[in-house]
């Protein structure tokens, strides 16, 4: 089951995805993002040490490290 979050502002459902990107110097980094539809890179749970917050202005969900 894909991890999803419903926006409190818009009521839309967003699904958590991950992707590995290549940075300068051929360094690789894993990024997390939310999308409106579940794709091939969808995650089943939030990674350890992270939490979901919602942007107050736009209502879009964001993933951040726990404080």
Image (cartoon, rainbow, N blue to C red):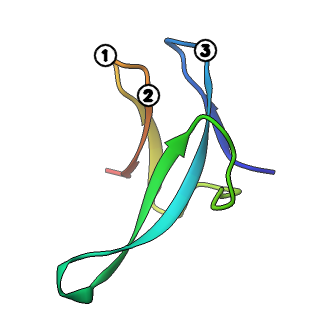
The image position of residue 57, as x and y in percent, is: 31, 16
Categorize mark 2 by other alpha carbons within 10 Å: few (<14), some (14-19), many (20+).
Answer: many
- Compared across the picture, whether 3 is left or right of 10 comes to right
Residue drawn at point x = 36 percent, y = 19 percent: 58
Could you say whether the residue bearing mark 1 is in a helix, strand or loop? loop
The image position of residue 14, as x and y in percent, is: 60, 34
On screen, residue 67 above or below 9: below
Q: CA distance from mark 3 to mark 1?
A: 14 Å
- Compared across the picture, whether 37 is left or right of 8 comes to right
Residue drawn at point x = 54 percent, y = 16 percent: 8
Could you say whether the residue bearing mark 3 is in a helix, strand or loop? loop
- Compared across the picture, whether 43 is left or right of 65 comes to right
Identify the mark at residue 57; answer none if there is no mark. Answer: 1
Q: Earlier in the sequence, mark 3 or mark 1?
A: 3
Q: CA distance from mark 2 to mark 1?
A: 8 Å
Q: CA distance from mark 3 to mark 2?
A: 10 Å
The image position of residue 41, as x and y in percent, is: 63, 61
What residue is disc 3 on? 11
Q: Earlier in the sequence, mark 3 or mark 2?
A: 3
Identify the mark at residue 21; answer none if there is no mark. Answer: none
The image position of residue 36, as x and y in percent, is: 60, 34
Q: Residue furthest right?
A: 1
What residue is disc 2 on? 60
């Amino acid at each position: 089951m894909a991890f999803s979050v419903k926006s409190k502002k818009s009521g839309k459902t967003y699904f958590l995805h991950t992707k590995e990107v290549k940075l300068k110097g051929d360094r690789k980094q894993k990024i997390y993002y939310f999308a409106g539809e579940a794709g091939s890179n969808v995650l089943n749970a939030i990674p350890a040490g992270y939490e979901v917050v919602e942007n107050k202005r736009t209502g879009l969900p964001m993933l951040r490290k726990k404080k």
